Image: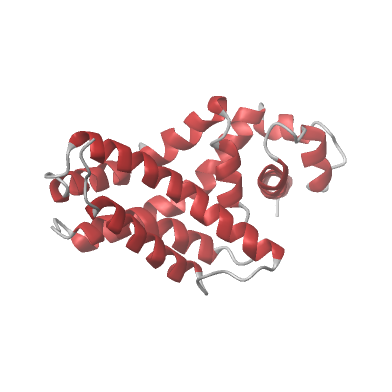
Amino acid sequence: MSGTTARGSRAAATREAILDAAERLYAEHGVAAVSGRQISEAAGQGNNTAVGYHFGTKTDLVRAIVQRHMEPMERLRIARLDAIGDSDRLRDWVECFVLPTTEHLGSLGDPTWFARFAAQVLTDPALRVIVEEQSFRAPSIQRIKAGLDRCLADLPATARAERDDMIRELMVVVPAVREASIAAGRPTSRATWHDAGVGLVDAIVGLYLADVTAT
């Protein structure tokens, strides 16, 4: 291995160690409460400026963590979308939205940190846009939205907007709560991430199809 290749491999390993440490610390303590020094130490880096050297600002680091999870989830969503084609079943479109997230979390092994990390990031107005840009605005999400629009054409616009907001919150809170329970050794209502995803699909389909009460 040449010197350049070895340095490149060490740099890549250092970046991954920093991403792992930052994701865990942000998930456990919140983004604002964690310093670059703490992340460097948790990543086993003697240089306290390693985070800034490899990633720049805290915002850049958060974006890198989000991106490394969104890319595999996007591939899973696209595969599901290709499989359902122009389906007219509401559940098919909801599964395309929900299951890639829970399947990705299930592929990471235990414990995972990303669900709690995302929940922490979404509480910060300055960082929330990073998740929204890389997830809710992804090409696959736009295809899912178009499919949902066709299936929910009879749902009044105000009710649709209200329920979309509820579902976005469910997509953040439900995985984060399950992840925290697993980390704490508490029992969960579903045995696997896949089963948890199926339960969340059931809930979202039911929410979309619930009666609309006039006010």
Question: Which quadrant would residue 29 be assigned to in this image?
Answer: top right
**Quadrant position of the N terminus in the picture:** bottom right
Left or right, 136 with respect to 150, comes to right
Q: How is the image coloured?
A: secondary structure
The outermost residue toward the right is 46
Residue at x-position 68% and y-position 50%: 20
Left or right, 92 with respect to 116, comes to left
Q: Nearer the viewer, residue 94 or 3?
A: 94
| Image location of residue 135, percent across then percent down | 41, 41
| Image location of residue 214, percent across then percent down | 20, 39
| Image location of residue 57, percent across then percent down | 66, 26
Residue at x-position 52% and y-position 70%: 189
Can residue 24 be seen? yes
Question: Which quadrant would residue 72 be assigned to in this image?
Answer: bottom left
In this rendering, the answer to whether 163 lies above or below 130 is below
Left or right, 112 with respect to 161, comes to right
Residue at x-position 57% and y-position 55%: 177
Q: Nearer the viewer, residue 14 or 128?
A: 128
In this rendering, the answer to whether 189 lies above or below 162 is below
| Image location of residue 194, percent across then percent down | 44, 69
Q: Nearer the viewer, residue 74 or 199?
A: 199
**Quadrant position of the C terminus in the picture:** top left
Can residue 138 be seen? no
Left or right, 175 with respect to 186, comes to left
